[in-house]
Amino acid sequence: MRIGVLASGNGTLLEAMLDAGLPVHLVLFDRPCAAAAVADRASLPTAFVERTSFGDAFDRRAYTARVIEALAEERVDLVAMAGFGTVLGPALFEAYPDRVLNTHPALLPAFPGWHAVRDTLAYGVLVSGCTVHLATPNVDHGPILAQEAVPVVPGDTETTLHERIKTVERRVYVRTIQDILKRGTVL
């Protein structure tokens, strides 16, 4: 299976995938980010599908079509979102049915959305964690593939808790993808 990674951030999930020897064939990013440098160091093909508009001016359908085109050019079979900051339209999930993975810094279905760690702390729970799930047009609501708990400790800040979650997330995401590759199917 040829993996396409969608990234917008530091590239730590991408680094974990590469360190594990996963067959990443494309790294696509929507903004200048450190993940692009990780891909360059690994001599991986990259696609910069820049998001240039936000709010009401953003044409999600056209942007999604550009992403799908870039993935198709590299014959990607499995899409792994790795901190990708743009919500994509339904066409992605039609082009890659049951083959778009995402990870989330909470134990879904609790605390969906962009501010999961902040929301976790505000609610006062004692346990958080990470979830690897099948991405769908309904953000953070796809079938759960794997989860692992991470304790919330006294004095945790959004930064300290998120860093502990990301450490677990890298391991769980890689293991989940490895399992998918062994099975030859996501579900």
Image: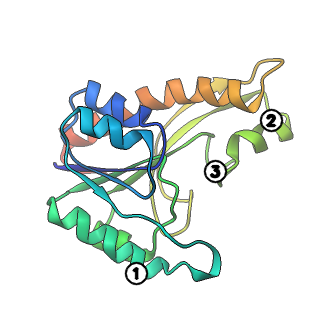
Q: What residue is rendered at 28% in x and 57% in y?
A: 47
Q: Which of 187 and 111 is in front in this view?
A: 111
* Residue 180 appearing in the image: yes
At label 3, counting other C-alpha atoms closer than 10 Å, the crowd grade (few under 14, some 14-19, many 20 or more) is few
Q: What element carries label 3?
A: loop
Q: Is mark 1 on a helix, strand or loop?
A: helix
**Residue 64 position in % (x across, y down):** 39, 73
Mark 3 highlights which residue? 109
Q: Classify 75 as above or below 151.
A: below
Q: Classify 137 as above or below 1.
A: below
Which amino acid, by three-letter code, is at mark 3?
Pro
Which amino acid, by three-letter code, is at mark 1?
Ala
**Residue 3 position in % (x across, y down):** 23, 48
At label 2, counting other C-alpha atoms closer than 10 Å, the crowd grade (few under 14, some 14-19, many 20 or more) is some
- Mark linked to residue 121: 2
Left or right: residue 154 compared with residue 148: right
Left or right: residue 83 compared with residue 176: right
Count of residue discs:
3
Q: Nearer the viewer, residue 61 or 47?
A: 47
Q: What element carries label 2?
A: helix
Q: Nearer the viewer, residue 59 or 5?
A: 59
Mark 1 highlights which residue? 62
Question: Who comes first in sequence, dot 2 or dot 3?
Answer: 3
Which amino acid, by three-letter code, is at mark 2?
Leu
Q: What residue is rendered at 35% in x and 43% in y?
A: 36
Q: Distance between the residues labelled 2 and 3?
A: 16 Å
Left or right: residue 169 compared with residue 156: left
Q: How far apart are marks 3 and 1 (CA)?
A: 30 Å
Q: What residue is rendered at 85% in x and 34% in y?
A: 124
The part of the image, by quadrant, that contains residue 164 is top right
The part of the image, by quadrant, that contains residue 176 is top left
